Image (cartoon, rainbow, N blue to C red):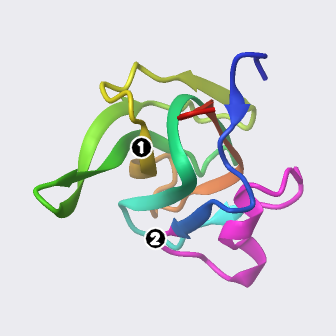
Amino acid sequence: MSGEFTSLITSDTIIKVSSTLDKSVGKKYLVDDNPETCWTSQQGLPQHIQLTFAHRVIPKRILLTFQGGFVGTHCILRVECDSEGEKNWQIWTSIYPEDVNRRQTFDLPSYNNDSGIRSLKLVFEQSSDFFGRITVYDLKVEGTVVGS
């Protein structure tokens, strides 16, 4: 990790996923730093991982480790925005992971809001798996906490 960025996923981060294949591959394994555990979705697309941070943050980089053959090969990053009192998800950017087992790092474009975001959703619209399953062994989001 770069000295300028910190890990934005903490024990206070709320993680939600679109589906889980079974309890042995649940969402808690996305961020447990154990290379032997993972989250696996049920079949069908799209699938998503939603992160709600304890504080407003400015994400700068996403690091993902997939199971080869079960990679979300097109991922749209959405941020939750308040507009006129209603919350909605707006597209921020897209990333295109390769169908490999190694950790992949994606630098993110500047977010046009200095006050940061509270929620980020990774929406996997395509998968290298014929049935649309996604398997993630590790997820990290690095950046800065607003006001720190």
Q: Position of residue 26 (x, y in %)?
A: 69, 73
Say what secondary structure mark 1 lies in.
strand
Q: Residue at x 63, y 65 (%)?
A: 40
Q: Which residue appears farthest toward the front when viewing the image?
A: 147
Report the quarter where the C terminus lies: top right
For residue 125, the mark is none
Q: Is residue 143 above or below residue 53?
A: above
In the image: residue 129, left or right of residue 3: left
Q: In the displayed structure, does residue 101 sit left or right of residue 64?
A: right
Q: Which mark is residue 18?
A: 2
Q: In this view of the protein, which residue sits in the foreground, 50 or 87?
A: 87
Q: Main secondary structure of the magenta part?
A: loop
Mark 1 and mark 2: Cα distance apart in space:
21 Å
Tell me if mark 2 has few (under 14), some (14-19) or many (20+) residues whose alpha carbon lies within 10 angstroms of its own: some
* Dot 2: element: loop
What x and y, as percent, mark residue 71? Answer: 56, 46
Judged from this view, the residue extending furthest toward the bottom is 23
Q: Which residue is the site of mark 1?
A: 117
Q: Amino acid at mark 1?
A: Ile
Q: Amino acid at mark 2?
A: Ser
Counting residues from the start of the chain, the first of labels 1 and 2 encountered is 2
Q: Dot 1, how many residues are within 10 Å of its Cα: few (below 14), some (14-19), or many (20+)?
A: many
Magenta-span inclusion, residue 23: yes
Q: Quadrant of residue 115?
A: top left
Q: Is residue 70 above or below residue 28?
A: above
The stretch in magenta equals 17-38
Q: Nearer the viewer, residue 147 or 40?
A: 147
Q: Residue at x 52, y 56 (%)?
A: 51
Name the residue at 85% across, 50% down: 33
Q: Does the segment drawn in magenta span residue 115? A: no
Q: Give the answer, above or below, for where 83 lies relative to 77.
A: below
Q: Where residue 7 appears, x then y in whole percent?
A: 71, 38
